[in-house]
Image (spheres, coloured by chain):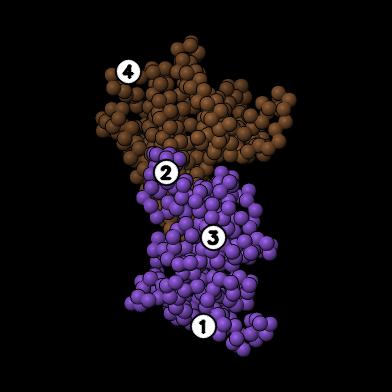
């Protein structure tokens, strides 16, 4: 179909009853691109993410991932193909330890997830891999604590780390700094800047500082429609965008 | 620190096993041997339920029907088809229970949470109705009598103390297998499904498959417990797969401590002994059992495995600051 596009949305429309949340959205994300999706509350950003990830069925249109039509594929089948995501509200495994959280992400695509009678502790290489990932965000010493014991900012970093552990071909980040104190938010931003090399990502974010730091292309959603789409600077300068969303402040 | 806890556990398990082994030889009344045999069987069924509730997050009310299907399968095979061997009987019961769960899972897993519970209640009632009314096969309300305990290889285990060891061995084997299972990579996946199914899907796990496969594994142990019970009781009736029986398994599971597997042993001990001893003293024994259950759930939702150590510590005048709700499972890891 379209070998070049990592993700291609064509005519994506979503209605909840009589409420139209998304109307004829067409977006293509090329491999290696880092694309931000912005728009006021209720613009349909999270709905769009849930449709791309396969958690929500769409009303019309189709979704292609890596050149294959995945419109009817389940969320886990898409994840298997290399699509990873984070959630707007932290969605970890609260009663498991930090390292167990990561091991779940690391073994997700490997046959050992069916192993029933050998202890997990025998998977030495998984522990090493998980520790190496934790090292990257400076949380190695917290590996054996319950993930619920971590601070909120640390949990957000684990949230992103889980997605990165999947070695994704496309990474969807849903407001990674939502609800974070400025210091924590900059931790997460720094992490994204460090990790973004070589990863194709789509980022939803309200914090413009984060957006401008991380992405190189912007899509603006308003009332479920794409009103602007282009390189960061071009969209920033677009008068219409400034009027409806940025309030002329940029 | 961790190895110390682990060593204490090894000693406790070894001591418990030793006591369990010598008890029937130590001259305790046959009645108690019989109650302990029942305890081993109920514990297997309760552990099979704990696998679902404590590790996958599925509250299954149809566990008694799987237990009962195992019991009926071996009873019908023995009385109507002359299949009376130990291994054939055991295998037949397990296969029958797993096949039933394979069907149940297809229906019940279309829902989650409360929906799943309601469907499993309905499924249990259907199986009970079959046992109650399909008289030509199940004997209806009269049940099936004339089941005899088969020999295990060269050993005659028809006596109460002989059969005690069969059930003890089955319990130890089940416990070891289930313990291995929940600590394996697959076990971690089950815990992930219990905690946050949405994230599991996002990671690429087929949540339905893990729930379904866990139901089948759980059913194998429930079916085995059913077979052992049929041989123990030498009678199978609709009461063995009633909703009451499902509730009893649930009470044992919760009373002992959800998500522990070893807690169920204590839950079963309390329920089996209390219900038998109390029913000899008062007709209101259900009320007493109800109060015990109520107190544990109110004051120690972690079950007896949390409550007893806490009371013990208080008796010795120590105050325990923090009581973990999931004791020792993590602490046991090397």
Secondary structure under tag 3 reads helix
CA gap, disc 3 and disc 4? 61 Å
Residue indicated by mark 1: A230
Task: Mark 2 and mark 3 in contact? Answer it, CB < 8 Å.
Answer: no
Residue indicated by mark 4: B156
CA gap, disc 2 and disc 3? 23 Å
Q: Is residue A2 visible?
A: yes
Q: Residues within 10 Å of mark 4 (few under 14, many from 20)?
A: few
**Which callout, 3 or 4, points to the residue nearer the camera?**
3
| Chain A display color | purple
Q: Nearer the viewer, residue A226 or A6?
A: A6
Q: Residues within 10 Å of mark 1 (few under 14, many from 20)?
A: some
| Chain B display color | brown
Identify the mark nearer the N-term, 2 or 3.
Answer: 2
Secondary structure under tag 1 reads strand
x%, y% of residue B42? 47, 31
Q: Residues within 10 Å of mark 3 (few under 14, many from 20)?
A: many
Identify the mark nearer the N-term, 3 or 1.
Answer: 3
| Residue furthest to the left | B82
Residue indicated by mark 2: A123
Say which residue appears at 46% left-offset and 69% top-offset. A200
Say which residue appears at 40% left-offset and 55% top-offset. A109
| Residue furthest to the bottom | A239
CA gap, disc 2 and disc 1? 45 Å
Secondary structure under tag 2 reads loop
x%, y% of residue B171? 43, 29
């Amino acid at each position: 179909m379209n070998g070049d596009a990592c993700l291609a949305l064509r005519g994506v429309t979503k209605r909840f009853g009589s409420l139209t949340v998304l109307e004829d959205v067409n977006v293509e994300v090329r491999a290696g691109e880092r694309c931000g999706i912005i728009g006021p509350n209720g613009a349909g950003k999270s709905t769009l993410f849930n449709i791309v990830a396969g958690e929500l069925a769409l009303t019309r249109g189709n979704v292609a991932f890596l050149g294959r039509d995945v419109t009817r594929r389940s969320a886990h089948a898409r994840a298997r193909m290399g699509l990873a995501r984070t959630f707007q509200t932290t969605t970890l495994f609260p009663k498991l330890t930090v390292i167990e959280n990561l091991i779940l992400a690391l073994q997700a695509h490997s046959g050992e997830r069916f192993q029933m009678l050998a202890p997990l502790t025998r998977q030495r290489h998984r522990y090493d891999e998980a520790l190496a990932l934790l090292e990257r965000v400076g949380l190695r010493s917290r590996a054996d604590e319950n993930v619920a014991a971590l601070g909120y900012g640390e949990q957000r970093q684990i949230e992103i780390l889980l997605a990165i552990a999947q070695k994704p071909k496309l990474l969807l980040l849903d407001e990674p700094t939502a609800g974070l104190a400025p210091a924590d938010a900059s931790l997460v931003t720094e992490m994204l800047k460090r990790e973004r090399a070589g990863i194709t990502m789509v980022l939803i974010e309200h914090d413009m500082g984060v957006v401008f730091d991380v992405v190189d292309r912007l899509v603006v959603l308003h009332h479920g429609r794409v009103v602007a789409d282009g390189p960061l600077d071009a969209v920033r300068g677009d008068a219409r965008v400034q009027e409806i969303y940025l309030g002329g402040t940029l | 620190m961790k190895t110390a806890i682990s060593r204490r556990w090894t000693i406790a398990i070894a001591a418990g096993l030793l006591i369990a082994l010598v008890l029937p030889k130590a001259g305790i009344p046959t009645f108690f041997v019989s109650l302990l045999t029942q305890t081993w069987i109920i514990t297997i069924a309760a552990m099979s339920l704990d696998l679902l509730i404590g590790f996958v997050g599925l509250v299954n009310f149809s566990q008694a029907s799987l237990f009962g299907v195992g019991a009926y399968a071996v009873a019908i095979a023995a009385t109507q088809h002359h299949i009376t061997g130990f291994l054939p009987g055991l295998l037949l019961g397990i296969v029958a229970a797993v096949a039933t769960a394979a069907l149940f899972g297809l229906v019940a897993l279309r829902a989650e949470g409360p929906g799943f519970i309601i469907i499993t209640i309905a499924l249990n009632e259907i199986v009970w109705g079959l046992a109650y009314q399909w008289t030509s096969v199940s004997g209806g309300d009269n049940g099936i009598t004339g089941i005899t305990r088969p020999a295990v290889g060269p050993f005659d285990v028809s006596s109460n103390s002989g059969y005690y060891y069969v059930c003890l061995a089955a319990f130890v084997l089940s416990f070891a297998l289930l313990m291995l299972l929940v600590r394996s990579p697959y076990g971690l996946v089950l815990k992930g499904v219990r905690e946050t199914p949405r994230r599991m899907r996002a990671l690429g796990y087929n949540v339905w498959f893990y729930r379904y496969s866990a139901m089948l594994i759980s059913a194998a142990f429930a079916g085995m417990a059913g077979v052992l019970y049929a041989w123990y009781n030498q009678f199978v009736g609709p009461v063995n797969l009633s909703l009451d029986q499902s509730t009893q398994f649930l009470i044992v599971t919760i009373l002992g401590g959800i998500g522990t597997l070893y807690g169920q042993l204590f839950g079963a001990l309390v329920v089996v002994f209390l219900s038998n001893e109390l029913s000899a003293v008062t007709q209101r024994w259900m009320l007493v059992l109800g109060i015990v259950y109520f107190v544990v759930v109110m004051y120690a939702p972690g079950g007896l495995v949390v409550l007893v150590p806490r009371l013990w510590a208080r008796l010795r005048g120590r105050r325990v600051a923090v009581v973990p709700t999931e004791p020792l499972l993590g602490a046991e890891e090397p």
